[in-house]
Amino acid sequence: MAPHPSTRLLSLVPLVPLLLLLALPHAPLTHAMCECGYRTPTLDIFTDALVVPSFGSVDLDAAPDFFPSAWSRDPVGDETVGTVMEKGNAVVDGQGVLGLSVRKDKKGGRVPGGEVMSTRKDISFGTFRIVMQTSAVPGSLASVSLTVDPTSSISLLLPSRLSPQALLTASMNPPQTDALGNPSTKSSQSLDVGGDPSAGWHEYRIDWLPTRTDILVDGRLLTSLTPPTTFNSSGGSVFALSHFGPGSTVSGTPPTIDATFSVLSVRLFFNSSDKARNDAYVSRCNSATNAGKDRRVCDTDSVVGTILSANDAASSGGGDQGIPSE
Ligand SMILES: *[C@@H]1O[C@H](CO)[C@@H](O)[C@H](O)[C@H]1NC(C)=O
Ligand SMILES: *[C@@H]1O[C@H](CO)[C@@H](O)[C@H](O)[C@H]1NC(C)=O
């Protein structure tokens, strides 16, 4: 005879406290789970992370981690028109997509653009992964950059106008020059991304390491740049996503209708140039003095949640970082 339904139900009851006990030890672990950093599939370890699966969780006005730029400048190099970055040109839509707009109507003779920068200025080496889509309106440039100082930077530049000019320019600045004074391909290259960057979401990735900078699109390695001898790696950098229409050889004539560069997600894993942060990391994670704690290294690919400074393990004791428990 089958057990009465209520008997079956009762027999489950003693299990409940046991399940709770099993579940409880995991709860505190979630908080500081990644406090000893993030490990890439190629086994590089970076101490810090800013992960934004959707900009819906980012308050650009409060700006603890990312903020919209406001600055303007005259043309530089072969640009024919100045740029004015306006806060109102960086907007998160209802789907959590960050839109950076270039406006057709000039302001004071300059083309209005949109930009979002990191508040962190101590970003030093790391892997930077951005899922984005350029505008289909000809005449603008979308850029992903890491700027160490006015002369040293790493940038990816994508013009919105169509091929054959729609090549990605990857460079480490100031570019190395060859014996004839031309930029060497070691530090600056134009690359075919193998498709239309305005036609869908693609992941653009910069892996900045001491001896090389790898550029990948959708996981495919496009090139490896060698740092120019004049590139200053010792300071921290600022991360920025920018959209502008400078009327340069690469961008072409500025857009005649408003153009939007869309950013779906940003995943940044990096080290810090800040001595206090690094000292704190060592005292938290030194395996000699903290036996067993090196387990609190997370794999970059398993980070599915949002990581902002509010749940930065290093600064506040952590938060729910959306890491599946082991
Ligand atoms: C980043 O920091 C970690 C922890 O200090 C260190 O093990 C790693 O070598 C650093 N990576 C780079 C590229 O400097
Ligand atoms: C490189 O950067 C460091 C840290 O910001 C700075 O102290 C140093 O002066 C820079 N070196 C050069 C050659 O600019």
Image (spheres, grey):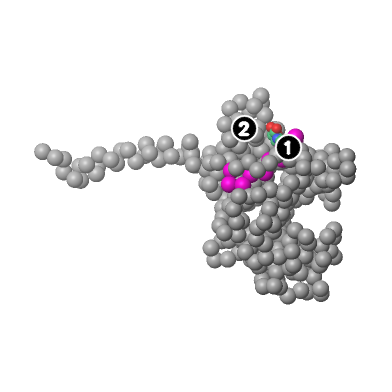
Q: Residue 133: horizontal and vertical position, in percent?
A: 60, 58
Q: Residue 177: horizontal and vertical position, in percent?
A: 85, 43
Q: Residue at x 53, y 63 (%)?
A: 95
Find out whether residue 217 is within the magenta segment. Answer: yes
Spatial distance from mark 1 to mark 2, Cα to Cα? Answer: 16 Å
Q: Quadrant of residue 73?
A: bottom right
Q: Residue at x 82, y 66 (%)?
A: 80
Q: Residue furthest left?
A: 1
**Side (left or right) of 36 relative to 174:** left
Q: Residue 214: horizontal and vertical position, in percent?
A: 68, 40
Of labels 1 and 2, the one closer to you: 1
Q: Residue furthest right?
A: 180
Dot 2 beta carbon under 8 Å from ligand 1: no
Instruction: Report the residue marked by disc 2.
Output: 43
**Side (left or right) of 129 relative to 276:** left
Instruction: Report the residue marked by disc 1.
Output: 212
Looking at this view, is 288 or 41 the one in front? Answer: 41
Q: As displayed, is residue 207 above or below residue 142?
A: above
Looking at this view, is 67 or 165 the one in front? Answer: 165
Q: Residue at x 34, y 41 (%)?
A: 16
Q: Residue furthest front?
A: 164
Looking at this view, is 301 or 139 the one in front? Answer: 139
Magenta region? 209-219
Q: Residue 248: horizontal and vertical position, in percent?
A: 78, 62
